[in-house]
Amino acid sequence: MQIYTKAYISLSLFLSFSAFSQEKFQDTTSTSQLEEVVVTGQFEPQSINKSVFNVKVITSQDIQNLAANNLGDVLNQYLNITVRPSGSDGRSTVSLFGLDAQYFKILVDNVPLVNEAGLGNNIDLSQINLNDIEQIEIIEGSMGVTHGANAVSGILNIITKKNSIHKWSIFATAQEETVNNEFALFDKGRHIQSLKVSHKLSENWFVSLGGNRNDFQGYLGEKEGPNHVENDGLRGYNWLPKEQINSNALISYSKDDFRIFYKFEYLDEKVEFFNSVVQSGFNTQLGSYRYSDDKRYFTDRYYHHLNGVGKLFSKLHYNVSVSHQKQARNVEDFRTLIVSKNELNNVEVKDQSMEVLYSTGTLSNFFTNDKVDLQIGYELVNNQGFSLVQEENNNVSPVRKRLENYDFFVSSEIKATDRFSVRPGLRFSSQSRFENQYASSLGLRYLFDKGIEVRGSLGKSFRTPTFEELYSKQIFDGHHFTGNENLKPETSTSYEVSFKKISYLDSNFRLSNMLTASFLDVDDRIDMAFVRFNEGSGIPEYEYINISKYKMWNASTNHQLKGENLVLNFGASIVGISQVIKNQIFTSDDKYLYSFNLNASASYTVPKWATTFSAYYKYNGKTQQFVESTSQYVISDIEASNWLDASIRKSFFKNKFDLTIGARNILDVTNVNQSRTNEGAGHAVTSSVMLAYGRSYFAKLTYNLNF
């Protein structure tokens, strides 16, 4: 770690301060071409250098070069983010700065996206399709004032396309991808097809329709598939087969300062789980037979979003969104007769669902003075949650609860001088289930000479308990895990300071260097902990309680060289995490545990060949965490891993066709070892953490017709 730390600091200082010493060449043409426009956290869309917040942008070009199937494919390359797949239900979630997906909010066009267990948080990344994306914007740190509850570690906003310069556009895509070394045209590998048709009806009206099918046939690995008849633990898949169908429709109208759009999306997903336990049976009709008890997960999501932007009294800017969303998961249990492949005793029940009526709106531009701007806003959330819980004696019962909040916030941007901007903000949240909550923030930006930008921020936010943390119950076979309706929201404070230098080496190249330091402190963190022994049975009972503390500091550096045909990126970070975990018997140490990460990417376009060469690399350093042993909390090590993607994208036939070929996970990462996960009786047991299914190759062909 000392070697990594010294190398990181030396390289960061060298790159940053050598760039800081360069003079900026004034070239307004290059500036306008290279400047990025962002919308997340802004009063109005504006150039990224004018934003008080540090906004990181993932471009549509990056998404195309990666041939990304879903959001997880993109975020695998992002610094400080870990994508966590699950082998039990096929979900993939995100962790930022060691905090799981409940602290990181995902939005689509500034509206949080629903899942079967919440709104905006704990989203399954594999369910987010990227076919219609303009760009992805990420802000790290507390964003509680502008985006409400659970925006603790950061937010991710997906900006979708809502217009076109062409009268007609048709995009058709076919993509074939191996899954490690497994591939066949129909029953192995990944097979993707998509189609989008858009039409500009007039100068004011625009419509589009699209659909996408993503057929992932699972990954066997050392498993033998669903037809394996031996009870040796080898039946089934390492990664579950999953089929997703996405469809969307958009209609928009714009005239002068008024814009309105309505967007509809539908997701239909099927995931198949094949039990590794094979059992024997006998009856007079079948004789001796082998069977297994399997499952299917069916997920449906409906997404409606109506947005209007315009002016009141020719002055005040308004932006209002209304959204109705519902996601539900059904589980089908059935018995598979393995040899004959027949199914028996099929029973399908609704397992979880969340239905949300959501609205948010802002009003700004109150003053004629361009030195001061004021924004007031509201957010209304009506969550209707449903879940099946398992009570004692194997009884299953439904739980239906409604969670509501009514939020009002105010934010101001004060341009004290042409160089110095201040942005204070405050949010009040009236909660139906908890005490009223508050969030506050203060952002600062100062522009020095020679392209140096300094930003600082302070944010206080909160996370409300999830439906599972409040109402879940899993009581069976000596296991007793329950939610807790008396939980209170977590509170957090974050600090960040950054230094950025932009230099124009000549009229074609821009060099950007940034150093960032941040700190996050979370109080009353919710965790599952042992609370008591059952008086009658003596079974240990576990419950969600407000018990943990969490602190994180991060130092990171990001560098970009961008030209007309070349983009180079390099980033590195050191993260230290301290957390206190307790149960009724013992408490973990609160010392800081450190990890080192870096990423780099390169993209070069050869105009003469209409070809782009790209490579993306990420190093995830060794991480540590406290795990519970028989008599104390001990430190568990998770091995380091390296991730590398590369692709070649070629346009031909007058840009009507794009062909992208490449490899994902070239370094063949699958599982990494985690130590001391089940320590007892003097033995330290090592287990594996599933990260990926190994190296895969892909070919993607897109037909573009614009006229």
Image: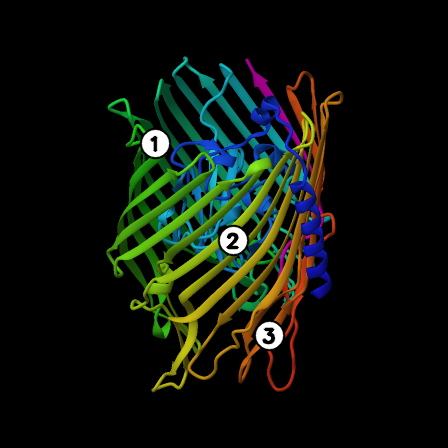
Q: Are marks 3 and 1 in contact (CB under 8 Å)?
A: no
For the N terminus, the image quarter is bottom right
Which residue: 43% across, 63% down?
Answer: 522
Amino acid type of the residue tagged 1 in the rendering? Asn
Which residue: 52% across, 36% down?
Answer: 49
Q: Which mark is residue 307?
A: 1
What secondary structure is found at the residue carrying circle 1? strand
The residue carrying mark 2 is 93
> Residue 379, position in %: x, y?
30, 44
Q: Is residue 176 something that shows in the picture? A: yes
Which residue: 60% across, 52% down?
Answer: 556
> Residue 544, position in %: x, y?
39, 70
Q: Is residue 225 left or right of residue 47?
A: right
> Residue 499, position in %: x, y?
56, 46
Magenta residues, start to end: 690-707
Distance in Å between CA atoms under marks 1 and 2 = 28 Å
For the C terminus, the image quarter is top right
Amino acid type of the residue tagged 2 in the rendering? Thr
Q: Are marks 1 and 2 in contact (CB under 8 Å)?
A: no
